[in-house]
Image: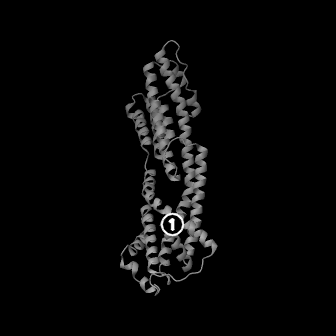
Amino acid sequence: MSNAALQSLQIQPCATDPVLAQQQTRFNALVRQLELGRAALAGWKERIDRYHQAVEPVRRELHAAWRQWAFALDHAGLQPGLTRAERAQLDELLREATTALLEVEDDAGLEELARRHEEGSSCAQSGREDAADEAGDEELPEEDPAQDWEQQAARASAQRAEWAAKRRTASARKRRQQAAQEVSRSLRDVYRRLASALHPDREPDARQRGRKTALMQQANQAYAEGNLLALLELQLQAEEVDAAHLAGVDPRRLQHYVTVLQEQLTDLQSETRRLETGFRAAVGVAPGWGLQPRRADRLISSEAQRLRGELQLLQRQTRLLGDLEATKTWLREVRSARH
């Protein structure tokens, strides 16, 4: 049943029976709210799909770039000319990076890298003391780096300050990804109620049994596809509600219809909140309810742009880790930012 059909299910309130008129008014209000709720849920499904198309590819690239950056830190620590303090600082940064990355997903290569750089590990020190310069912890005079590197180093230090926050949210992000693969509670509840109402074996009338069998097949398909809107539509059809039937329905039966519509509205609102909550968490917006579609679209574009900028900066920073003087300058920037 389409939204237009739902909208047409409006009852003229009875002028002679206040109790019935109240139920009819409630029914009309629920029909209108249900139409709006269906539209809102469909809009959020569309925006979630748009988010995945626009953001997830960049996020995967960024994760790969962070992984490459962790190995670049490992290689940077092998450069001759670094002090012991600088090598220890690189080890600390590498441990932070591998810890955060491994909280997102398992990675045998990163696990091995993390083991080699565990704090106090002999592996982290072997080969590096021989490469350290004879000046010990004292740094040799250095030339000023290029202006471009200074700008990038300043941005990189700010980025490192954000890394701790990303580590705290990594586990939550992983849980959201796992939860997204499960059928939502509201979807499951609607399907169970619908299956109970449509079970063909409980229908003695042959014509109705055939009708319910067809509806049950549609319900099974909608449930397999995770299509809550289709299940809600089938649920209303299962009640055989139409304008002609409603014109003479008794108060007791009408109350049953009101109950069904209220359950549908609750399910719609629950599912819509779930989608909006996940979206807000993904784009870094404070928890809440009622985010406008236009703002959601802007947030999707902004998040994709932010991630692309972070990716480009990280790629430049990874390349510069191969330069000794640039690495020393960057390490000073990081120390300054953390103190």
Report the residue at 57% width, 34% height from top. Answer: 3
Question: What residue does disc 1 label?
Answer: 337
**Which image quarter: residue 85?**
bottom left
Give percent across and percent down for residue 315.
Answer: 57, 69
Crowding at dot 1, Cα within 10 Å, few <14 / some 14-19 / many 20+, comes out as few
For residue 141, say whether it is visible. Answer: yes
Quarter of the picture holding the N terminus: top right
For residue 323, say whether it is visible. Answer: no
Give percent across and percent down for residue 273.
Answer: 48, 42
Most foreground residue, 127 or 9: 127
When the figure is inspected, residue 291 is found, relative to residue 120, above or below; the finding is: above
Colour scheme: one colour
Most foreground residue, 265 or 337: 337
Q: Residue furthest right?
A: 147
Give the secondary structure at mark 1: helix
Q: How many marks?
A: 1
Amino acid found under the numbered disc labelled 1 = Ala
Give percent across and percent down for residue 200.
Answer: 41, 34
When the figure is inspected, residue 53 is found, relative to residue 81, above or below; the finding is: above
Most foreground residue, 236 or 258: 258
Q: Is residue 194 left or right of residue 43?
A: left
Q: Is residue 105 left or right of residue 306?
A: left
Report the residue at 58% width, 57% height from top. Answer: 304
Report the residue at 53% width, 36% height from top. Answer: 37
